[in-house]
Image (cartoon, helix red, strand yellow):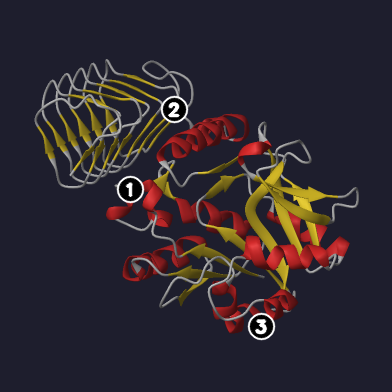
Amino acid sequence: MKALILVGGFGTRLRPLTFSCPKPCVEFANKPIVCHQIEALVKAGVTEVILAINYQPETMRESIERYCEEYGVSIVCSQETSPMGTAGPLALARELLTKDNPEGCFFVLNSDVICEYPFEEMYEFHKSHGKEGTIVVFPVDDPSKYGVVVSNEQKEVVSFVEKPKKFISNKINAGIYLLSNSVLDRIPLKPTSIERETFPLMAEDGQLCSLTLKSFWMDIGQPRDFLTGMELYLESLAQKSPESLNKGEGYLGNVLVDPSAEIEEGCLIGPNVTIAANCKVAAGTRIANSCILEGTTIAGNSWINGSIIGWKNKVGRWVRIESLSVLGEDVHVKDEVCLNGIIVLPHKEIKESELVQGKIVL
């Protein structure tokens, strides 16, 4: 079984983190985003993963050998020389997808989707309906903000409607597909949108079915949704693998701390916090609803809430960081500084408070 992950985007919505590495390599819950997907694909029987890459290909290639060894899977790259949209990369990788593929189908997924991936269920459903494609859909509370997928009682997709003014469906495209090899005959070798060009034609021909996702789902491609997705992921861990979370004195709610991190006594961590490898958090620190990336040091009596702290940051004493602040790699925040909804680019030193939400420190 094969799978293709669309990792060709520039990750602009997740800057400044993506200035330092491609979005799929940004750690989500202490593991690169793409590794969550690879791990689930391997569990479902996938033996070869194709990464459709464009941005920072060297960094992606440096990670591949480690991922292959860790997950016991073959990983190859299909590199775009120019952006090919969401369908063009499939045409570019046609030979890789079809060679030695006795199942006659392959998974496709966006690189910034996090959920309880239903790959086994998708495969059984796809084989049962016999159409060319299966698209995973997810129900939302307010479908007027999205393009919705309309299916009939037989789960056949009949249309796609962009931001409907009245209710016709509450299911949106979840960015996870299982496609038969024959779909590649529909895709030209040029920039093409699978959502706007390929799928509508498949629906017209009665060749696309939808499978409703029963678990949580989030596109984590921007900071606010990244933190929301982290909360949903931690809640899923609490239900399925509670032993993986940190409990006891100093922890509140769902918290995931890498074993190599050092948390001094007198801290209060949580709820909804992840702290990555080789971090150090000094006594008196309070962290909630936040992600702390690898190698960061936080001095005593600081407060971090609803924010993402990048790799190898140094946060001083009595610092306050909140309101969806995002700090890039190697940022130094001096003592007694307050950051309120501030974006800080990599390799900066912050000596004074910044209180205007949305400001970018260049």
Q: Is residue 85 above or below residue 146?
A: below
**In the image shown, does 184 or 277 lie closer to the viewer?**
184
Which mark is nearer the camera, 1 or 2? 1
For mark 3, what is the residue? 100
Quarter occupied by the N terminus: bottom right
Q: Secondary structure at mark 1?
A: loop
Decide: few, some or many residues near mark 1? Use Cα within 10 Å; few <14, some 14-19, many ≥20.
many
CA separation, marks 2 and 3?
Answer: 44 Å
Instruction: Say the numbered circle drawn on residue 246.
Output: 2
Q: Is residue 182 above or below residue 315?
A: below
Query: What residue is shown at x 59% (from left), y 59% (from top)?
Result: 109
Left or right for 218, reference 136: left
Decide: few, some or many residues near mark 3? Use Cα within 10 Å; few <14, some 14-19, many ≥20.
few
Residue type at numbered disc 1: Arg
Q: In this rendering, does residue 175 appear at all? A: yes
Which mark is nearer the camera, 1 or 3? 1
Residue type at numbered disc 3: Asp
Q: Tell me which numbered mark, 2 or 3, is placed earlier along the sequence.
A: 3
